Amino acid sequence: MSQHVIFQLLEALLETLHMVAVSGTVASVLGIPLGVILVVTGPGHILERRALNRVLGTIVNAVRSTPFIILMVAIIPFTRLVVGTSIGTAAAIVPLTIAATPFIARLVEASLREVDHGLIEAVQAMGASPLQIVRKVLLPEALPGIVAGLTITLVSLTGFSAMAGFVGGGGLGDLGIRYGYQRFQGDVMAAVVIILILLVQGVQSAGDVLARRLNKRIIDREESKAR
Amino acid sequence: MDGALEVIDGDLNNPKTPMPMIRMIGVSKAFAGADGPVDVLRNLSLTVEKGDIFGIIGRSGAGKSTLVRCINMLERPTSGWVIVGGEDLTSLPPADLRRSRRRIGMIFQHFNLLSSRTVFDNVALPLEVIGGIGRHEIRRRVTPLLDLVGLADKRDQYPAQLSGGQKQRVGIARALASDPSVLICDEATSALDPETTKSILALLADINKRLNITIVIVSHEMQVIKELANNVAVLDRGEIVEEGTVYDLFAGAKTDVTCTLLRDIASRELPEAIRERVTAEQEPDGQPVLRITFRGPAANNPVLFELVREFAAPLNILHGHIDYIQGKPLGILTVAVGGGASHAAAIISRLNGYGLRGEFLGYVAARDLSAA
Ligand SMILES: Nc1ncnc2c1ncn2[C@@H]1O[C@H](COP(=O)(O)OP(=O)(O)O)[C@@H](O)[C@H]1O
Ligand SMILES: [Mg+2]
């Protein structure tokens, strides 16, 4: 492999990391609150708002059921509005964020629903406000699940970012297709795949470790031996 | 409606009767069911005095949890008033209700501790909810509570590392953190073994005495009520069917519901050798087993002698002991009655005539008696 190709691989890796990191962060900032709202406005919950809940649920489902490649094209005007261009890494970040937000929202929603209703009642009995219930009970208790959900999201984003080449976003996937598929350079394609595997493994392992460390419901054997 | 409110005013204005801690007036609660609303509480009224330990007992599904959850408005009554410390909680706007809830601590059957927080942080939670309390002040208030419940050495552990009894102790410390005047215990010992139950009940009694907190304790187990409460209400199908001191209830239960709840205790106190022999079905040589409760002046009469003379019934004493309820003695005698079941029924009604309580426990075979 020439130095040129190695340089290109590195550049593509950085582009991928850039796309995944930015879209993952922005989608978390939007998706976590959205997931919270989906839960607390649900039937029988602390801020029941049936109409709002149904509207948000429908929007989330609509975005989630749109194939990414179609979403990317369909929102080009919006992308241009946000980042000023419809081509390049920044332009790829917008559809990635929009696709990941409802994904995160649903995963967060599922984690929050796992929180025992008894805990909510216990703090309600202390006189907690809905905001306090979210901050002191729902989010901390669901944190291991939320971290696991965000890990899944990052892995999925890595996959989706391969399609960013479609709007000139670059990244590993794009490089793999250009060299491996269009120019028949199998070694480049193999290198891309290996880097992607390592990347996904790394993200997944880090997420698993973090989620396990945050989970105080199951105490590790070593820890309990220590006490 | 006006009538009920007059009663409240009357109490407030009458310096002789101190204001009760909790007052529920005409409380009803209906839940939406598949075929229309289901009445879970029916026009129920009760009064809990300051500093009392008030028991609520009833079968599973009687509405006990719903009742106590109406005290802190976790469940909003469909109609009626709930007055705690002189304040009508049913009419409070949400923010005021949240403030008033701090005066009512609650502990739960399944503890409901936050798994993500240490023991210390669980106990500190109500203070965080109140807000505006600094770290030092929180430590100053939480530490003595951990000492009180005997968990000072577990302060940095997580609930998953604790036993059931320890978890409930954390629950108690947490409920006391906001310095409440009422503590509600909903089946607080039902998930615990008998030994742990005893220690938790002792802790609650201690808290009641030391901090003068009014305790409302809900249980389906008579043993719990007997050990802890002074006064008791028997709940059945959303209505209070019997109410009074625990002593009176044990000495002279009036309703079938109460008798059924008491029977559980009655058979438990029999020595195992005898308990094993008591059957629900009568065998050919079976003799009815009666449990007679003696109290008050009637205990001084030669009751057994008169029974033997009147019914010409050989009474075989299986077991006898003196039970202390709230420090007052209650004589309990378990006898087998020769001469058949009809005899037993007549004896029970005669005992009631004396003002004593007679209860039918089952049958015991005559040959087993001689073996025992
Ligand atoms: N939130 C609810 N919705 C509908 N029915 C309920 C609800 N809570 C309690 N119930 C019903 O009310 C009855 C009494 O329940 P509960 O107060 O929990 O009884 P207990 O505590 O005495 O066992 C039960 O039949 C139960 O199914
Ligand atoms: Mg209950």
Image (spheres, helix red, strand yellow):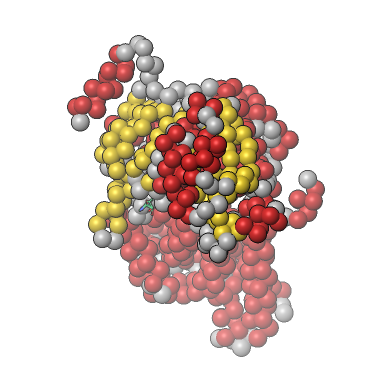
Residue name at image x 35 percent, y 22 percent: B86
Question: Residue B159 placed where, x, y %?
Answer: 64, 46
State which quadrant residue B48 falls in.
Answer: top left
Residue extending furthest left? B2
Residue name at image x 36 percent, y 40 percent: B240
In this view, A206 is above or below B68: below
Q: Is the N terminus of chain A in the top left, top right, bottom left or bottom right quadrant?
A: bottom right
Horizontally, residue B124 falls left or right of residue B101, namely: right
Residue name at image x 60 percent, y 59 percent: B365
Residue extending furthest bottom? A184
Question: How many numbered circles are shown?
Answer: 0
In this view, B144 is above or below B169: above
Question: Residue B362 placed where, x, y %?
Answer: 53, 54
In this view, B118 is above or below B19: below
Q: Is the C terminus of chain A in the top left, top right, bottom left or bottom right quadrant?
A: top right
Residue extending furthest right? A226
Question: Residue B341 placed where, x, y %?
Answer: 48, 54
- Which residue occupies the foreground of this view, A176 or B147? B147
- Which residue occupies the foreground of this view, A66 or B72? B72
* Residue B343 in sight here: yes
* Residue A188 in sight here: no
- Which residue occupies the foreground of this view, A219 or B368? B368
Question: Residue A115 placed where, x, y %?
Answer: 51, 53
- Which residue occupies the foreground of this view, B156 or B3? B3
